[in-house]
Amino acid sequence: MGNFNPYDQENTNRQIIEALENIAKQLQQLNHEIRNINQSIRSK
């Protein structure tokens, strides 16, 4: 992610969107891992 530039709103918006998309992907991965852990615990 590049530097924050308050004078380049389009670039800043794009960087924020990319960061949020990355966070969303990480949350989906964590959710999947937690579901797998829960299933593992239930099956024991």
Image (spheres, rainbow, N blue to C red):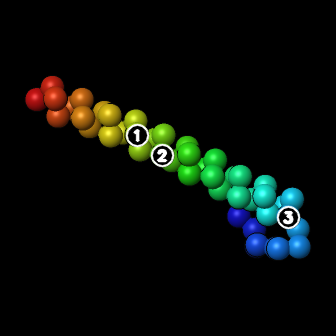
Q: Say which quarter of the image contains residue 39.
A: top left
Q: Name the residue at 24% across, 35% down.
A: 38
Q: Tell me which amino acid carries mark 2.
A: Leu
Q: Are marks 3 and 2 in contact (CB under 8 Å)?
A: no
Residue hosting label 2: 27
Q: If the image is split into quadrants, where does the C terminus sit?
A: top left
Q: Secondary structure at mark 3?
A: helix
Q: CA distance from mark 3 to mark 1?
A: 32 Å
Q: Position of residue 12 (x, y in %)?
A: 79, 63
| Mark found first going from the N terminus, 3 or 1 | 3
Q: Name the residue at 32% across, 34% down.
A: 35
Q: Secondary structure at mark 2?
A: helix
Residue 31, numbered circle? 1
Classed neighbour count for the residue bearing mark 3: other residues with Cα under 10 Å, few (<14), some (14–19), many (≥20): few
Q: CA distance from mark 2 to mark 1?
A: 6 Å
Q: Tell me which amino acid carries mark 1.
A: Asn
